[in-house]
Image (cartoon, helix red, strand yellow):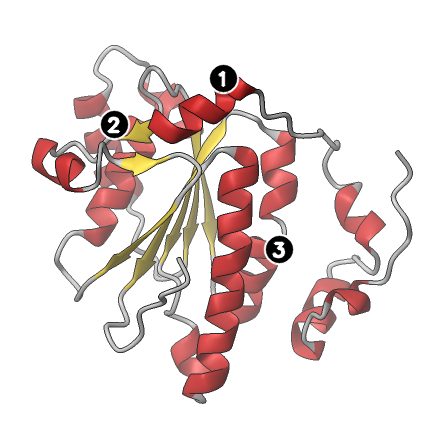
Amino acid sequence: MTVPARSLFTLGISDELLKEIEQQGYYTVKDLTERWPKKKPKLSAWSALQQDVLAISTGSAELDKILGGGFKLGNVTEVVGLAGIGKTQICMQLCANVQLAPINGKAFYIDTEGSFMASRFSQIARASLPDTDLETIMTNVTIAKIYSMQELLASINLLQECLEYDENLKLIVIDSIAFHFRSFVSDLIERTRILNTIAGKLRQLAREFNVAVNVVNSDCYYKSNDY
């Protein structure tokens, strides 16, 4: 299939983010798609049934019960709360548990606050998968360190290519979604509009690729109703 040389300008990307992406050598949709081999996602009736029932356990029977089995594939789940209540702990536990049968998947962790601690995750990994080589567990989790709103938006825009490249990717974590918006977007209406657009994109990816998306929100003044 030939990918048209469509300008990234036509995707509605802000001028600031467009400049950021162009500085990395991407000017058209074709430039982005050629970075990874293209795979056409397929969804059989059996896969659709599994999408309705498969979930990643949180490691807590009570919490799983509340969630209807855990963090379900094909859905976006938003975790909201004050700092220090264990949101990142849940995220890291999910990164380990997604590797358990019957999912046997991988995780992509977008870390905007520097919360992911490899040493802590290694402890969780050893406890959760004692019969699996630690290096294998750690390698199955890809971490993207994000330092600005522009990098966050660029990462979300490239998630589809990552999912097409690796069909074993079954968990996406964004920890946290609103962190960089506090500094870059002061207008609440504009901030809500952008976050709701992101929510729509994440829902589409979750359903199309049968992946669980876990969005952490530490901003208790903002809670999206769009997830």
Residue on which disc 2 sits: 125
Q: Nearer the viewer, mark 3 or mark 1?
A: 1
Which corner quadrant holds the N terminus? Answer: top right
The relative height of residue 64 versus residue 181 in the rendered view (above or below) is: above
State the image coordinates of residue 208 (x, y, percent, origin top left): 57, 38
Q: Earlier in the sequence, mark 1 or mark 2?
A: 1
Residue sitting at x 31%, y 57%: 216
Residue sitting at x 36%, y 65%: 225
The span from disc 3 to disc 1 (Cα, nearest Å) is 29 Å
Left or right side of 97 for 139: right
For numbered disc 2, what is the local secondary structure? helix
> Could one spot residue 17 in this view of the protein?
yes
For numbered disc 1, what is the local secondary structure? helix
State the image coordinates of residue 118 (x, y, percent, origin top left): 31, 40
Q: Looking at numbered disc 3 in the image, what kind of residue is underneath it?
A: Asn
Q: Nearer the viewer, mark 1 or mark 2?
A: 1
The span from disc 1 to disc 2 (Cα, nearest Å) is 30 Å
Residue on which disc 3 sits: 157
Q: Earlier in the sequence, mark 3 or mark 2?
A: 2
Left or right side of 184 for 135: left
Q: Quadrant of residue 166?
A: top right
Q: Looking at numbered disc 2 in the image, what kind of residue is underneath it?
A: Ala
Residue sitting at x 24%, y 19%: 129
The relative height of residue 187 versus residue 74 in the rendered view (above or below) is: below
The span from disc 3 to disc 2 (Cα, nearest Å) is 29 Å
Q: Which mark is residue 46?
A: 1
State the image coordinates of residue 38 (x, y, percent, origin top left): 74, 33
Q: Looking at numbered disc 1 in the image, what kind of residue is underneath it?
A: Trp
Residue sitting at x 26%, y 32%: 122
